[in-house]
Image (cartoon, rainbow, N blue to C red):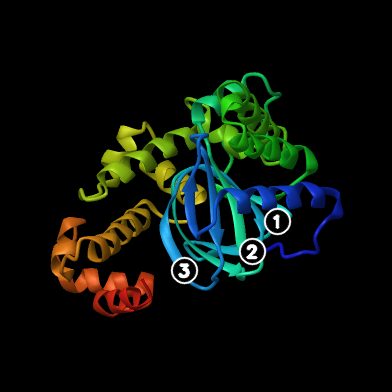
Amino acid sequence: MNSFITPLDDGVGAQRAELAQLIEGLVDDDGVHATAIEPLHLVRCANPGETVYGVHKPALCIIVQGGKDVRLAEEHYRYDPLHYLVVSVPLPVAGCVIRASADEPYLCIRLDIDPALIAGLVTEVDPVPAAVDCDVRGLYLDRIDAPLLDAMLRLVRLLNAPDDIPVLAPLALREIFYRLLRGPQSGRLQAVVLQGSQSHRVNDAIEWLNHNYVEPLRIDELARRVNLSTSSLHHRFKALTAMSPLQYQKQLRLQEARRLLMAEGLDVAAAGYRVGYESPSQFSREYSRLFGASPVKDMARLRRIA
């Protein structure tokens, strides 16, 4: 487990306090809130404990108040206001807010990553050859510093000055991603956006799976599609996502089936068939393994707390 629950650092305390005040003034209910700055989202949660499953977009996440546990396959990443989280490729994850209350709700900023912007900045930043294209996770934590938090603060302030957003938001976004690329983990982002790198090819495979998860998975065909050998695809894919392509596809299928059961009221067999399962019993077994309960019991529990 990556555990980073640590005492608060006074060096960035004032910036964090202002961010918390801004977010509380901008959102007054729990949930993920879109903003006038397209890649920027504000997250609030006053009730910890419920695990939320989803495919996390590439993004930078900064907790302003509270704490969260994120699970990727069998790995746990626990982080707090002193550390930021970066997801560099789409990943099926489970997240659980572990520190929040009505008086001090969990507050988080999610800034979706624009690969084109990162790729453009890479040409202007000294590369990190040793880190590029090595076997690294597509999700990582790092310690936040004052310059990165200050750039994020200036971006969030713009939400209260909408006339300034068209001119100043692109500058703040550029600075935020520039600071990520100047950090010690920059090679992880570079590897994914650099055309021709093996990590970029694996990212192409990930994108294909996200759009075609219902289809039967043939690893040799997928490897040819992204111009990798079958062994290289399997090895690199697992290094980046902590799971094999088949396990990744299974997570996509099961998460979508859960959404269909809850949002569209499909029966178990229909939901499983819709996402590519031919056997209802296999679907129920794999669903129970991921979510901890059968589809019927899980839906009954979710509807009680909805």
Q: Residues within 10 Å of mark 3 (few under 14, many from 20)?
A: some
Reading the image, the residue beneath label 3 is: 51
Q: Residues within 10 Å of mark 1 (few under 14, many from 20)?
A: many
Rounded to the nearest angstrom, the CA distance separating label 2 from label 3 is 13 Å
Q: In front: 97, or 166?
A: 166
Q: In front: 119, or 67?
A: 67
Q: Quadrant of the N terminus?
A: bottom right
Reading the image, the residue beneath label 2 is: 67
Residue 14 vertical position relative to residue 45 in the rendered view, above or below = above
Query: Type of residue at label 1?
Result: Pro
Q: In front: 10, or 129?
A: 10
Residue 129 occupies which quadrant of the picture? top right
Query: Type of residue at label 2?
Result: Gly
Q: Quadrant of the C terminus?
A: bottom left
Q: Secondary structure at mark 2?
A: strand
Reading the image, the residue beneath label 1 is: 81
Q: Which label sits on residue 107?
A: none
User: Does residue 140 appear in this view?
Assistant: no
Q: Residue at x 28, y 78 (%)?
A: 300
In primary-sequence order, the first of circles 3 and 1 is 3
- Residue 108 vs residue 283: left or right? right
Q: Secondary structure at mark 1?
A: loop
User: Does residue 16 appear in this view?
Assistant: yes
In primary-sequence order, the first of circles 1 and 2 is 2
- Residue 143 vs residue 297: left or right? right
Q: Residue at x 65, y 29 (%)?
A: 172
Q: In front: 227, or 283?
A: 283
- Residue 103 vs residue 119: left or right? right
Rounded to the nearest angstrom, the CA distance separating label 1 from label 2 is 7 Å
